[in-house]
Amino acid sequence: MKSFLKEASLGLSKKNKKLSSKWFYDFHGSKLFEQITKLEEYYPTRTERKILKDNKIEIANRIGKSAVLIEPGAGDIKKIAIFLSNLDKPKKFIPLDISEDYMTKISQSFKRKFPKVAITPKGYDFSGNNKLPFKINSSENIIIFFPGSTIGNFEKKDAVKFLKMLKSKFKAKKIIIGVDLVKDIPTLISAYDDKKGVTAKFNKNILQRINTELGGDVNLNSYKHLAIYNKSKKRIEMRLKSKNNNTIRINGSKYLIKKNEEIHTENSHKYTIKSFKNLANEAGWKIEKTWVDNKKLFSVHCLNLAL
């Protein structure tokens, strides 16, 4: 909670106000995102699942024998289940998520489904320079599974830093990673601003957490959810627009949010195959294999260490 307080206070005190998207994810936020993945407009999840399903044998072969699978930001851990049965004697599965309560609960049904795979869920914020909550044995076949286009939530320089960290800190041999592709703007906007308003609730959950965890007094109805496409940066930006002059009180401090002022809460960068290849290469990885759906909406890549 201290880090949330620190980051929220810092972000709201800036001229261009921002809150990190990682704070969407308490138990309630994780459940909301689970709902988002099932929405008609939200193409990434179903498209990526189909790619994984259609190529599960090849993916398993590229992962190899006795894998130690680590999934940062694991969420509902349903995607790894698509190919887990095809793996050759996987050693263990370590799902990591900032919401440890959600991770622990979700993992219970996973254990029943895959009783032969050792699963050890851990609460972990991979966005910071935090100590790993488990020991790494660099001699093992460590594979990072990073689906869902979460790599797009990073600024480009931070994405490179993150991919480098998977090599230096996690000692990964390979990465199986999901990457959302550049496409027509209406499809992108719809995916982040659905008709049912679930994404709006998800975006506002960060304000709800300020209320429940930091003693804030935010009126959620005083803010409007926005999803815009920044063409020059090839990214969706989620924002919360203040409908009138508002004051957010946190821990004895006041933050004035003027009418029509926006709090930037999330970026989701979109890539071409070439631009992601360049990003991976910069971080010391090479693309071993790329899988893409027929409509070229989404991609999954197997990254290998560049020699």
Image: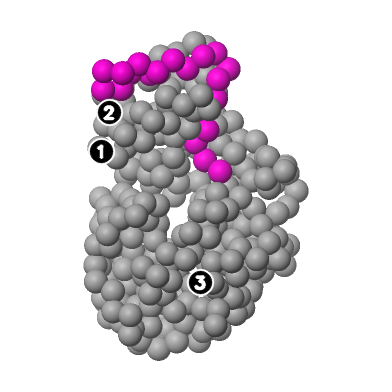
Does the magenta portion include 256?
yes
Q: Which residues are magenta?
A: 248-267
Q: Amino acid at mark 3?
A: Ile
Q: Amino acid at mark 1?
A: Met
Q: Is residue 44 above or below residue 238?
A: below
Residue drawn at 26 percent across, 22 percent down = 251
Residue drawn at 27 percent across, 59 percent down = 131
Q: Residue furthest right?
A: 184
Res 107 quadrant in image: bottom left
Residue drawn at 30 percent across, 55 percent down = 130
Residue drawn at 40 percent across, 14 percent down = 247
How far apart are the two marked residues, 2 and 1, measured between alpha carbons? 8 Å
Identify the mark nearer the N-term, 2 or 3.
3
Tag 3 residue: 176
Q: Pointer 2 and pointer 1: residues touching (CB < 8 Å)? A: yes
Tag 2 residue: 214
Residue 110 shows up from this direction: yes
Label 1 neighbour load within 10 Å: few <14, some 14-19, many 20+ = few
Secondary element at image label 2: helix
143 or 172, which is in the foreground?
172
Tag 1 residue: 1
Q: Is residue 120 above or below residue 204?
A: below
